[in-house]
Amino acid sequence: FEAILTAPDAQLKNFDADGNPIFGAPEPGQTHFDDIRLIHEGIKDFCRDVAEIFGDVLLCVPIDKIFIDAWVRAFVHDTKIVATDLREIFTLDDEYCNTFHGNALDFYMNGLDRQES
């Protein structure tokens, strides 16, 4: 979910002499900032709606890791939840940590396939 929860700027490289941030070129997934902003607005609207409906009861709901994992699996596997043209938003090219380059959904699916076999 790093691709969606990313800040609306490219990777911070350094600061100039005046203390202003200098950003690198956007990574592949970061070229979709306008789409990501819309997704952020949708997330905020959803959270507001849920909070209005359920109020403080939400604070008492236990977090079920098995349920969350099942939800994430459904999200990744179901081709109708994330439209084909939006899947590229999940492309990561982590230059800062140099740990992952590719589509996060494909990475997660490949990990699930290895776990299930």
Image (cartoon, helix red, strand yellow):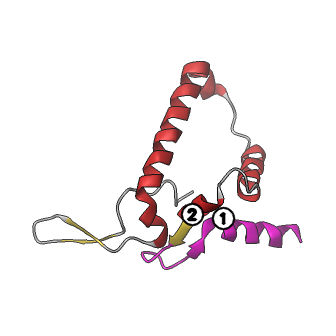
Name the outermost residue toward the front. Answer: 85
Residue assigned mark 1: 105
Name the outermost residue toward the right. Answer: 117
Residue 101 drawn at (x, y percent)? 55, 77
Residue assigned mark 2: 90
Give the mark, 1 or 2, whose residue is nearer the N terminus.
Answer: 2
Residue drawn at (45%, 61%), measured in percent from left and top? 32
The reply to whether callout 1 and callout 2 are in contact (CB within 8 Å) is yes
Quarter residue 7 falls in = bottom left
Residue 18 drawn at (x, y percent)? 10, 66
Q: Quadrant of the N terminus?
A: bottom right
Residue 115 drawn at (x, y percent)? 82, 68
Does residue 87 appear to the left or right of 7 in the view shown? right
> Amino acid under label 1?
Leu
Does residue 103 appear to the left or right of 7 in the view shown? right
Does 115 lie within the magenta span? yes
